[in-house]
Each structure stands twice: as structure tokens, then as C-alpha cells.
Amino acid sequence: MNSIQGLLNGFSNVVTPTNLSFTFIGCLLGTIIGVLPGLGPVATMALLLPLTYKISSPTTTVVMMAGIYYGAMYGGSTTSILLNIPGEAASVITCIDGHEMAKQGKAGPALGIAAIGSFIAGTISVIGLTFVAPPLAEIALKFGPAEYFSLATLGLVLATYLISGKSVIKGFIMVIFGLFLGTIGLDPVSGSMRFTLDIPALYGGIDFVTLAMGFFGIAEMLTNLEKQESIQVIATKIGRIYPTLKEWADSLMAILRGSFVGFFLGILPGGGGVMASLLSYALEKRLSRHPERFGKGAIEGVAAPESANNAGATSSFIPLLTLGIPGNTSIAMIFAVLLIAGIQPGPFLIVEHPEVFWSVIASMYIGNVMLLALNLPLIGLWVQLLKIPYSLLATIISLLCLIGVYSVQNNIFDVIFMIIFGVVGYLLRKFDFEAGPLLLAFVLGPICERSLVRALMISEGKISVFLTRPISAVMLSITAILVVLSVIDSIKRSKSQNM
Amino acid sequence: MRRGNFSLKGLLGVLLIVTLMSLLPSESNAAYPEKAIELVVPNPPGGSTDVLARLVSKTAAKYVPQPIVVINKAGGSEVIGREYVAHAKPDGYTLLMGYGSGADVVSPYNMKLPYDPLTDFKAICRFSAHPYVLCVPSSSPYSTFEELVDAAKKKGSLTIASAIKGSLSDLCSQVLGLRFEFKAVPIGFSGGAEAVTNLVGGQTDAGLGHPSEVVGHIKAGRLRPLLVTSKERIQISPFQGIPSLFEKGYDGPEFAAVKGVGAPNGVSDDIVGYLEEKFKLVSEDQEFIDGMNQVVQPILWMGAKEFQAYVADLNTAYGKYMRELGMAKY
């Protein structure tokens, strides 16, 4: 059965009242939990799982779960832009320019471009999924520890591109602080417990959500509460709801580039999502004629990572559906759902259960349309949220953060840590230290270190392995080129300043 | 005195009722279970222990009048969830799923635990045990375990994709090297799934995975299974033809991630007996059997007393290996 025929069959399967309603329920739930800080798709899917036992068709269950997952990506941009709170690692980048735009009264266009970009990216990604999934999955398999090391190194160098503040040194300090925080816990490669102070809650390391809620959510609030003027600023400056044509034109290429970057990187198990948004942002900044706009509310800085996010969320299904390998925890949950329903995800899925395979893909096309229809009208509503007196808004946000962070692991220590990070983050902000590079280093650092050690263990100590393996060599070369270009740039800049 | 509603008679009446109520049977004598039972899974949702817990919870609804609710308390290499159960009230409303796994029989030797895995828990029953399947990627030239070992001796070492260093799968890799006299280099991935993914990609020479983690890849021809680490061969397809470790001359404890149910120590024998009986019914339920087959988890029932001794024995046996290999810190 060729792809077109399979897809058409899938559509006919999905366009039933039951399947359509469940796709919609999934998308709606996904959007809601995406907006709520902390609460994630995995916890939601786990909660809903017992209810799905009564549903006879596995297709119906999976289209709903899938809807929750990519729906959360749509919703995540809302909190990133409006409140400067990233829902997941991949949303950190959106906060940078997104929240700046909100502060300038352009929350509406930011949300609009995020929604539309997500739709375009999601659709492009599903088309890619439909036609080129198997060969791409093969390429993903080629990524071993050496490749992950090179990718993470590239990511860490790109993270410095994000340092938008005045002091690059302070940005580096945050990167190092982030690397340090990433080491806390049990190291899987060496088996050593690092910096856990014998507190069991730290054995598994600090959770990303805790860190993000603390450094972005709580710290942001503490900072804002202190600065009385900023409260008025946001409330009075709510401008247009929809993006202008110019903003559209500016973002289009960013959306397209972000979609492709996200699609390819999302396939990589473990860390693909973060790299996708990071790389797409850095790419836009590099290609832009006015890179200094980035970090101050450039619309491409929202369009690119949001598109990359959504494209990546969809393409992360590829390893699951073609190889039976889950790339992240949400996909692992969907893997479990399929298993419990008696379906073994893997290369035989398309042969043994073509109706499930194609129905899920067809539901993604429909889901993207539903999400666009859901999110666009809501923009007006979200923007009004900013009008709420900040004292009330801050209270609600704190409550959501507290509950959200607890919901991740049902552990009160996470809440305590979040508060500690919130206070530390607030203090750091007062001295112009930004949290973005810290969070990125926190995610990329462990990947970098563990992959380095594993790669060297496999190659029996030969460092040349990073250059003899082609994919790794390419990425390291790109990293080297970027570093050289940055040095040249800074030399040029200091020369022109001296003149 | 008849002023207002407050009268001495009323007060005495209230006191009498309160006294009588306090003499009513307390919770432990009341019909157990009276409310929902928490089944704590110390892993994130979606993993094999979680899936097992959900299957048990789903089937138990037929035999237990109260719902058994699965709660995930992941973190700290399965320590957080266990700590929660170990320190919970021993009234039978908080149970642990996954008792007997590496966290109870290997971790005590290399991690400082805030509880004692043997004395702070009461074993209720064992549902399953997942052995490891030693596989090589399809690109590998070796088709039997003997060929692999010979090549390892010639090459000098063998990289084996395993779960985190210090885990049961890591110990298993090292013991294979120890007993069959080759240098095993376990590569510590963050979990079984990551290890299997890397193995399928051919990043290491061999790897260990649970049957449920490797079955899809074996069927797709990407992985070639060479050995299973349980005493008996696995009877579920496609593992039937794969020899067991014990057929190769190995003598010692079998390597399997044991999945049992535990309760905090101090729980009454009545409750243990009740749960043991109900869980036995679950394990024999056809719907449960079908479900377990679908998720490729074998059903290996063991009752409370036998299981308690089993876990203690495993702990001691692995402890010996840990010391022999120099992996033990405690």
C-alpha cells in the first residue's frame, strides 16, 4: 500500500465522530496543560490512561494521546511569551524574544505568529513523516555517543549566541553555573553520586521543570513585584491582536527554516527538541541583517523556535512508529499506551496495524488545523490576562507554579528547590545575569559529558573517534567555524569601535 | 438551669456518644480495604514496572472492592518511591510495585539508602521477573555466545550496552565477563531503552535488554539474541530457542529485574494474607495473562514468605559479586 493510499485510508478512519472528538479532546487538553506551567503531557496521559481502558479502539486512544502531546507544544508558547515561564526545555528560547515582545505591547502578534508558525511547521513535519519516515529513522540510528557529544558541543557554543545582555562574561558565568547544576545527581556512566549531600531527592538530579519554574517563574515575579512601574507598563501597552503583514513577511522564512531544522533534529532521541529550537534561533540570528534585534523582541526570534518545536514534536514520532524506539518521555508514554492496547510499535506496525499507523498520521493533519482554530481566537483572551492587576496575577502564577512543579514527580523537595532557585534567580537578575544560558547549559551539559565518556570508552580512549566518524566530524567543524567567525566578528567590532 | 441550649444533660450525652465511638473497632480491625489503595511505582509512567502496575490495578478491580490507584513517585534511581512507602503508615493502604528489583538487591551496596530494603519492607508477592537478553546488532559477525566470548578474548574487550553504572544490568555485564573470562566494558546508558537504541544502531559490540525492550527489534531482524540470563529459557516467542546462561556452565543467582509488591514493615499478617490471596487471583486471571503476554512480561508468581526469603538471598548473592568485582561502596 503506497503512502497516498494509506494516508487516504487513515483519513477515512479518523473522520468518524468518535475519532474526531477524541482528537479534539486531546488537542484541547494538550493546549490547556501546555499553558499551565509545570503540568506536562506525560502526567496528563498517565492520569487519563485508566479511563482509556474502556475505549475499544487503540486508534482512538492514541490519537487523543498524540493530540495532548503536540497540543502541549502549541500551549507552551503562551506562558513563554506572556509570563516568561518556559513549559519545557524547548520553550526556553521562545521566552527570550517572545516576552520582550509582550513587554512592548506586541503580545498578540507574538502569540499569533507562534500559533501560525506552529501550524505550518506541524503540517510540514507531518508531510515529512508521511513520506520519508523510514530512511530518516535509519539516519537517527547512526547517532551514537560521539555524534551526541558533537551535537551537544555545538549546542553549548550556540547557547552563547543567546547571550543578549551587555556582559558576555556574565552569560558565560551562567553557562558554567548551569553546567554545574547539571552534574548534580547520579552519573549513569561512572556511577558516582555528585553533590547530592545524601539527600535522596537529589539522587536523580534536579528536574528541568523545577529549575525553569524557579529561575523564570518565581524570579520573574519577584523582580516584577519589586519594580512597581513595570506592572503598569504591560497593562497599558496592549496593542494589536494580530500580526501585521510586515511581521508576517519577516517571519515566513524563519518559520520555514525552523520547520526543517525542527523536523530533522526532532527525530533524534533524547535532546532533539532543545537542539531544534536552539539551532533555529541561532540560524535566524546568523542569517539576519540586523542580528542586534534579537533578544529585544525580534519576531523571527519567536517564529523560528516555535516552528522548530512543533516540527520536532511531530517528527519525534518517527522513531516510535518506524523503529519502536521512544525518543522522549511523552513518546515513551504513547509507546506504553500502544503496548497495553496490544500493539507493538516498530517496523511491523505499518504492516500489522496499518490502520493505526495511518490513522495517527491522518489525525495529526487534522489536529494541527484544530489547534490553529483553537489557539488563534484565544489570543485575544490571553492578552486580556495581562490586564489583571499584577498582585493578583502573580499570586495565580505562583500557585500554578507550585502545583505544577509538584505534579512532575509528586515530590515536595521539588517545590522547595524551586523556591530556592526563585530567590537565587531574582538576586542574579538584579545583577544582570540572565537565566536562558543557564537552563540550556543545564540540559546540554550532561548530554555532552556522558556522550564524551561513552564515546571514549567505546573507542578505547582514541580521541580521533570524534573526527573519524563523519556526522560527528561535520558538527564539530561547524562548531569550529562558528567559534572562528565569532572571534572575527568581535575583532571587527572592537576595531570599528576604536576608529 | 434551663438557660439556652447548653445543658449539663446535653454535655453528658455528647461525652457518652464520643466515648462509645472511641470504643468502636479501630481501622485495623475494620474490613480492609475500606478506601483506595495506593500502589506506588518508583519509576516514571510508561516503563515496564508502570505498565505492570496498571495491568494489576485494572484486573484487581474484579477482586478487590476498593480501587488500587497507581501513583508514580519517580526519582533517585527508584529510591524516592521506596522511601515514601518505607515510611508510610503500615495500614495496607500504601504498597510498592517493583519490590525486589535492582534497587533492593544491588543499590544497597553502592548507594546510601534512607531505609533498609530488607527489613523496612514486607514482601507480599512476586508478579514477574524480567531476565536480560544478551543481543548483538545484526551487523555483528557472531551468532552464538561462544563465538562472542572467543572474539572478546581475542579483541581484548567487549563493549556491552547496559543501564546505569551500578545497576543490575551493569552488574550482569561484569559478571558475564568475570565468569567467562573476558574483559567486559559495560557502557552505562541512562536506562534500558537508551541502551537498546544504541545497540540497534551498532554503537556497541553487544548489549543487555529486557525481553519487552528487544522483542520488536529481534522480530525486525535488527538484533540477534544470544543468551538469556534466567535459569529457564523464556517460553514466549521469539525467545524460545535462545539458550540460558545456566546451560553454559554458569552457577549463581539468575539476573532478572524482579517485580513484586511490598508493603511497609509493620503491616499486619491479615492484610498480607488478604493481598497475597487477591493478587494470586489477579495473576491467574485470563485478562491479566493476555495483557502480560501482549507487553511481553512473563508471569512468575511467588507468595509472601517465599518471596521475602528470595529477595534476601538475591541481596546476599549480588552483594558477594559486588565485593568480588570491587563495585561495592557500602
Image (spheres, coloured by chain):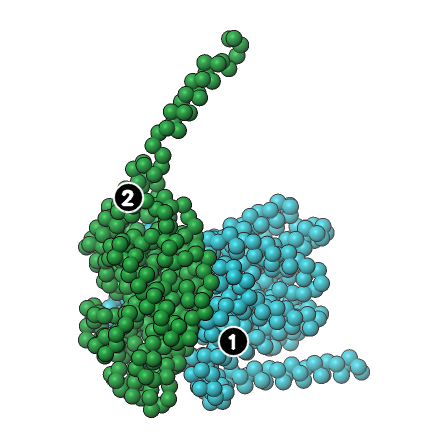
Chain colours: A cyan, B green
Q: In which quarter of the image is residue B49?
A: bottom left
Residue at (58% x, 52% y) in the render: A383
Which residue ends up furthest to the bottom in the rendered image? B154
Nearest to viewer (mark 2 / mark 1): 2
Residue at (23% x, 75% y) in the render: B246
Q: Position of residue B167 (x, y in %)?
A: 39, 69
Residue at (34% x, 66% y) in the render: B316
Report which residue position mark 1 lands on.
A449
Which residue ends up furthest to the right in the rendered image? A499
Chain hosting mark 2: B
Tags 2 and 1 in contact by the CB under 8 Å rule?
no
Report which residue position mark 2 lands on.
B270
Eyeballing the image, is B248 above or below B304?
below
* Residue B257 or residue B56, whichever sits in front: B257
Chain hosting mark 1: A
* Residue A499 or residue A227, whichever sits in front: A227
- Residue A232 in the figure: left or right of residue A475: right
Eyeballing the image, is A287 above or below B86?
below
Q: Position of residue A72 (x, y in %)?
A: 46, 58
Crowd rating for badge 2 (residues with CA inside 10 Å; few <14, some 14–19, many 20+): few
Numbered marks: total: 2
Where's the C terminus of chain A, which quadrant? bottom right
Where's the N terminus of chain A, which quadrant? bottom left
Callout 2: helix, strand or loop?
A: helix
